[in-house]
Image: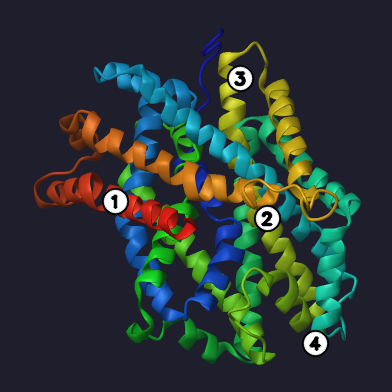
């Protein structure tokens, strides 16, 4: 096989890399999942647990994946194989890279379907489809979309084409350039909606709901939910950050950059809460309405609001931008692998990977209609893909990655490269060797017990 046929790509600047990494982290997990998890978990108690967990788990695993990727300078499989060999370890560690690529690949297949929902709702909301509609009518609209295989296929296809066009152009001209455009636009739209909420009512209640400490609601379930979301929100365990790290130069300070990415990711997640909950509260809707919060509850509110068609269209444009910045990162590890280990050039590697993901996405979207009776261990195809990745592949890959980094690599070399010493290094060792892996293991085992 032809491996490393040409010089490995590099980010053109640290700023471009930060935006790409934040773009990967800021996806549906922030704009869609985080707010409804807050709603289901009692508000501020979940936020407190989440902030604590992301510092102790997300941060060290993110740094570890970038570090390994930069050391290997190849696709995740070859990176783990080569780094392991250089450390005197077995090249079978390449399985960790393979697991990450597979996880990201499978996630994109159903993630693209949801991205298609958001694209569809830009046009629906902007055309005034929800004006004056009650909850039954809005719910019926969403159900009708899910029941139409044709509608879902069209929007899933459009979303995958957008993703493939960006990735196919390359790392700097595609992913980095798109991130430099989409991330500022995402931020502008998000804060315009938050600004609208400040003057239109419900903001104070939403702010208290998110930030007023209420430790009485803190329990083991909320902590575990926060632990899991802190792990998944940063795109770790998917091969993404290893792939992104492979395009990094030695001049980038991993610790400072990881802090910046986590801060920006968290700020956007909290801002999403301030964009959504004031609308929910001012319209007397349920903040704990689960995944339907975005595609059912909010359209009801947009239909009642003055200027709701514009605000609603902007909101679903925001959702789409967030989905695209993550989808390009989910596709990249597979494209990098094909480009380096086959005779395919960048364009053809992207086409092949995108088409296979698209086909798997068709199977996922058919689970809502024509293939609704097709079950895998009691789950439809969409839910089976979700559970396989979120409950198994991602935590296993993330756990293996941090164990490799903290226990199987030369720690003196890591200390020198991270420029840590004294107490800071001792704290880093405790967090990376014990706290992060044990926490991921706890989430994994608890999830397995809960599924049993």
Element under disc 3 = helix
Q: CB of mark 2 within 8 Å of CB of mark 3?
A: no
**Could one spot residue 12 in this view of the protein?**
no
Residue at horizontal 56%, vertical 7%?
A: 1
- Few, some or many residues within 10 Å of mark 1 (<14, 14–19, 20+): many
- Label 3 packing within 10 angstroms: few (<14), some (14-19), many (20+): many
Name the residue tied to disc 2. Answer: 321
Question: Mark 4 or mark 1: which comes first in sequence?
Answer: 4
Name, please, the residue furthest toward the left.
Answer: 422
Q: Counting residues from the N terminus, which is met first, the one under dot 2 or under dot 4?
A: 4
Residue 331 visible, this orientation:
yes
Q: Residues within 10 Å of mark 2 (few under 14, many from 20)?
A: many
Mark 2 vs 3, N-terminal side: 2
Q: Which is nearer the N-term, disc 4 or disc 3?
A: 4
Nearer the camera: disc 2 or disc 4 = 4
Above or below residue 7? Residue 273 is: below
Query: Which residue is nearer to you in this view: 415 or 41?
Result: 41
What is the C-alpha distance between the residues marked 2 and 4?
Answer: 25 Å
């Amino acid at each position: 096989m032809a491996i490393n046929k040409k010089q490995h790509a590099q980010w053109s600047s640290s700023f471009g890399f930060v935006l790409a990494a934040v773009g990967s982290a800021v996806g549906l997990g922030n704009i869609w999942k985080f707010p409804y998890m807050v709603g289901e978990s009692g508000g501020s108690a979940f936020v407190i647990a989440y902030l604590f967990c992301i510092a102790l788990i997300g941060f060290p695993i993110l740094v570890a994946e970038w570090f390994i990727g930069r050391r290997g300078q190849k696709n995740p499989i070859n990176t783990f194989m080569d780094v392991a060999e250089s450390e005197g370890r077995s090249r079978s560690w390449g399985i960790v890279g393979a697991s990450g690529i597979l996880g990201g690949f499978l996630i994109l297949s159903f993630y693209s379907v949801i991205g298609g929902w958001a694209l569809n709702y830009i046009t629906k909301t902007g055309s005034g489809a929800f004006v004056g509609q009650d909850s039954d009518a809005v719910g019926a609209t969403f159900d009708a979309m899910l029941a139409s295989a044709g509608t879902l296929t069209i929007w899933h296809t459009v979303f995958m084409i957008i993703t493939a066009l960006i990735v196919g152009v390359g790392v700097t001209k595609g992913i980095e350039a798109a991130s430099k455009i989409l991330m500022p636009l995402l931020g502008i739209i998000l804060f315009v909606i938050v600004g609208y909420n400040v003057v239109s009512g419900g903001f104070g209640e939403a702010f208290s709901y998110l930030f007023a400490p209420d430790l009485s609601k803190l329990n083991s379930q909320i902590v575990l939910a926060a632990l899991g979301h802190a792990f998944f929100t940063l795109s770790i365990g998917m091969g993404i950050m290893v792939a992104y790290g492979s395009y990094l130069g030695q001049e980038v300070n991993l610790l400072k950059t990881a802090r910046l990415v986590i801060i920006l990711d968290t700020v956007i997640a909290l801002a999403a809460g301030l964009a959504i909950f004031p609308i929910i509260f001012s319209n007397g809707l349920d903040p704990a309405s689960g995944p339907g919060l975005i595609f059912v509850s909010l359209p009801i509110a947009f239909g009642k609001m003055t200027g709701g068609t514009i605000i609603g269209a902007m909101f679903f444009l925001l959702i789409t931008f967030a989905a695209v910045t993550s989808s390009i990162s989910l596709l990249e590890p597979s494209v990098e692998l094909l480009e380096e280990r086959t005779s395919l050039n960048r364009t053809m590697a992207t086409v092949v990977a995108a088409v296979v993901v698209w086909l798997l996405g068709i199977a996922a979207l058919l689970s809502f209609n024509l293939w609704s009776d097709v079950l895998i261990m009691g789950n439809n195809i969409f839910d089976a893909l979700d559970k396989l990745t979120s409950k198994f592949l991602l935590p296993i890959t993330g756990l293996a990655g941090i164990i490799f980094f903290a226990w199987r690599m030369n720690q003196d070399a890591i200390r020198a490269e991270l420029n840590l010493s004294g107490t800071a290094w001792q704290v880093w060792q405790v967090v990376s060797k014990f706290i992060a892996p044990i926490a991921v293991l706890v989430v994994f085992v608890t999830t397995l017990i809960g599924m049993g």
